[in-house]
Amino acid sequence: MSNIEKVIEFLTGKYSFNQRVGIILGSGLDIFNNSILFSIEYREIPNMPLSTVPGHKGRLDVVKINNTSVIIMRGRYHLYEGYSSKDVVLPVEVLKGLGVEILAITNASGGINETYVPGDMMLIKDHINLTGENPLIGSPNFVDMRNAYSPRLREQFKEIGKSNGIELKEGVYVGVKGPTYETPAEIRFFRTIGGDAVGMSTVLEVIRARSLGMEVVGISSITNVHRDETSSVTHEEVLEMGRRISKNLEILLKEWIRRGI
Ligand code: HPA
């Protein structure tokens, strides 16, 4: 039995899940703390690695929003921590194994698009995977990545944004390995190839989710913006701005679930 099968057997043997919707939360995006039905720490789950970065918890929460329960993964694995692409996609595989068919992935990212300001939220319409990794290597799985970010779900979020007065940008997410932030030359390159935001997560998870037939929506919190040679960024800033954006992100996600998707 593979590690992931053991994790799912452990979870389904101990707890009851019947969820269609799963959410992966990014750095500093600490939301849905008031409606938790039950939680399982990753460290209680045999074969589940632990995240090593401040600001990243390792916990699975089942949360009740109106009458829908949703599984939240707080804590993901990053390539820059030394994890493999197979480790990085574990939370997606766990969610799929627990019955999730619709996956919302959130992250903190740096703005590349010069019209963005810190605090913006961006619906991901497409990505460019510059990590040099792919979780499907080893299984000849030629997944179609057109419309990987569901146009149907994007429309729903745009509509919810409009009716709640929350502005949502829409753009292309560039996925890199990290852990260094980008040089000005790299940012110019990403802008030239059509990137709007850059971050160190998401792309591998989306590839795996699509290979498992899940419908995906991705939302980036723009915690900092790369403007010129003088704009700098720190991990603390990213976490702090993530927290400030959390309120609107929670409104969007709650309303999305409340409407029944
Ligand atoms: N670059 C990469 N990842 C990030 C950034 C950034 O500027 N901000 C938050 N995550």
Image (cartoon, grey):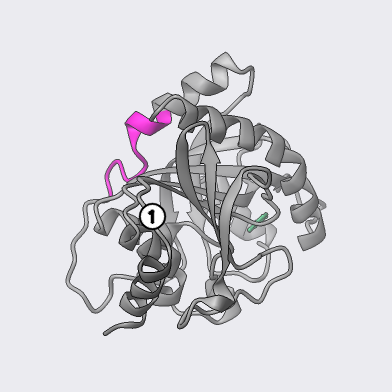
In which quarter of the view is residue 208 placed? bottom left
Magenta highlight: main SS:
loop
Quadrant occupied by the C terminus = top left
Q: Residue at x 47, y 82 (%)?
A: 46
Q: Hey, which residue is sitting farthest top in the picture?
A: 163
43 falls in the magenta region: no
Give coordinates of residue 25: x percent, y percent: 57, 53
Residue 143 x %, y %? 21, 57
Q: Is residue 56 left or right of residue 198?
A: right
First to last magenta residue range: 145-154
Q: Is residue 13 above or below residue 257?
A: below
The reply, left or right, for residue 16 in relation to residue 174 is left
What residue is shown at x 57% (from left), y 46% (from top)?
197
Closer-to-camera residue (236/46): 46
Percent position of residue 17, x then y? 38, 55
The residue drawn where x is 62% and y is 30% is 251
Instruction: Pick the residue in front: 52 or 230.
Output: 52
Residue identified by numbered label 1: 17
Image quarter hosting the N terminus: bottom left
Residue in view at x 66 percent, y 43 percent: 222
Looking at the picture, which amino acid does disc 1 mark? Phe
Using the image as rendered, state which of residue 34 and residue 106 is in the foreground.
Answer: 34
- Vertical arrangement, residue 240 with respect to residue 114, above or below: below
The quarter of the picture showing ligand 1: bottom right
Q: Is 149 colored magenta in this rendering?
A: yes
